[in-house]
Image (tube, rainbow, N blue to C red):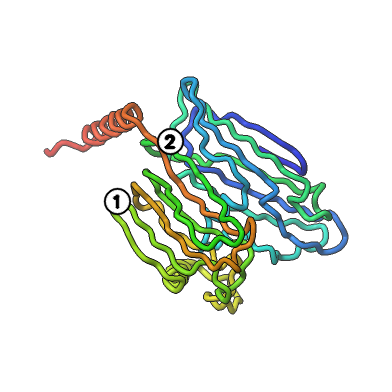
């Protein structure tokens, strides 16, 4: 699906298994001079709704900056959200791409369909390339069993907040705290936090969050020719992964202590991945898995 400046486009996805969205920003410079490649992904909003048996489940409804950064924190694709973008030379183009995982497979069969709507606002691209640039949004096809209906939710931290408890409830698979206005660790937004759940509880200082972040960066390749200090050189450096997709947790609560003089309006957001399920979904997944296992066993050659 192609979405240009100030456009809203929709698509119904049917008869496939998907587990996320791919977002590609094609930046085309038709001018005779170099221009910035900055993209303000807050100006593009996506809505994804699963329609099944007369019931609608909202998978996600938010802007691409929030969703994309939360999905790509501590990865090379985090550069898509760096406001100090590169320059596009005259009459050339550039591509910015990232993915937004749903956190689980959605099997679309029969009358099922996934409704996707994307709306681009006027300031998505810098003015010089607005007329020629566009977004492409497509489903991420996958192979797997649908064991739940995933959803991505967010909570904005209010300006000058000093402390708050965030009760995320059950079935939490991933949680990320985002920051948009800090470029280093000097003026920390978070003082410390306590996470509690059914099988993981921990007290984390700001130093613990930094250590975890640098360890995650250590798994990524650093761009050739760079001389980055991993502790202080990446924008949104105070965005932290608090829980990842490897497990799911119940009774999740974050008790976060902030430095209120560092909390500015709209620049700090808690994003989390959760899901709902029921016995119909679980039984269907179990039956499919058993069927595939039977086929795999039957395909094993008999011993001579």
Residue at disc 2, secondary structure: strand
Instruction: Give the left or right position of residue 23, taking residue 18 as reference.
Output: right
| Nearest to the observer: residue 55 or residue 262 | 262
Q: Residue at x 55, y 63 (%)?
A: 76
Q: Quadrant of residue 33?
A: bottom right
- Circle 1 packing at 10 Å, graded few (<14), some (14-19), many (20+), is few
Question: Residue at the spot x=71%, y=55% of the render?
Answer: 39
- Judged from the image, the secondary structure of the residue bearing numbered disc 1 is loop
Residue 302 shown left or right of residue 193 in the figure: left
Q: Earlier in the sequence, mark 2 or mark 1?
A: 2
Q: CA distance from mark 2 to mark 1?
A: 21 Å
In percent of the image, x 33 and y 28: which residue is there?
Answer: 284
The residue that disc 1 covers is 198
Placement of 91 over or under 232, stated as above or below: above
Q: How many marks?
A: 2
Considering the image in quadrants, where does the C terminus appear? top left
For disc 2, the neighbor class at 10 Å (few under 14, some 14 to 19, many from 20) is: many
Please name whichever residue, 234 or 228, is drawn nearer the observer in this view of the structure: 234
Q: Position of residue 42 (x, y in %)?
A: 67, 51
Kindly report which numbered mark, 2 or 1, lies closer to the viewer in this rendering. 1
- Location of mark 2 (residue): 149
């Amino acid at each position: 699906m192609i979405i240009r400046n100030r456009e809203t486009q929709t698509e119904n996805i049917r008869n496939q298994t998907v587990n996320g969205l791919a977002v590609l920003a094609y930046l085309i410079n038709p001018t005779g001079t170099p221009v910035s490649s900055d993209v303000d992904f807050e100006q593009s909003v996506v809505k994804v709704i699963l329609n099944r048996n007369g019931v609608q489940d909202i998978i996600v409804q938010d802007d691409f900056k929030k969703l994309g950064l939360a999905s790509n924190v501590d990865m090379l694709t985090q550069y898509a959200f760096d406001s100090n973008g590169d320059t596009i030379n005259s009459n050339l183009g550039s591509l910015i791409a990232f993915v937004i995982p749903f956190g689980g497979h959605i099997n679309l069969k029969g009358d099922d369909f996934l409704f996707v709507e994307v709306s681009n606002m006027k300031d998505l691209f810098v003015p010089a390339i607005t007329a020629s640039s566009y977004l492409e949004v497509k489903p991420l096809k996958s192979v797997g069993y649908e064991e739940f209906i995933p959803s991505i939710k967010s909570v904005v931290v209010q300006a000058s907040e000093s402390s708050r408890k965030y009760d995320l409830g059950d079935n939490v698979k991933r949680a990320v705290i985002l920051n948009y206005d800090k470029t280093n660790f000097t003026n920390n937004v978070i003082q410390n936090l306590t996470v509690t759940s059914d099988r993981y509880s921990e007290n984390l200082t700001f130093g613990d969050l930094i250590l975890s972040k640098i360890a995650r960066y250590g798994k990524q390749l650093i761009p050739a020719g760079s001389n980055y200090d991993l502790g202080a050189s990446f924008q949104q450096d105070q965005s932290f992964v608090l829980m990842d997709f490897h497990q799911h947790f119940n009774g999740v609560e974050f008790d976060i202590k902030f430095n209120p003089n560092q909390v500015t309006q709209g620049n700090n957001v808690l994003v989390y991945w959760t899901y709902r399920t029921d016995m119909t979904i679980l039984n269907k997944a179990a039956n499919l898995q058993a069927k595939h296992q039977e086929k795999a066993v039957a395909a094993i050659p008999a011993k001579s």
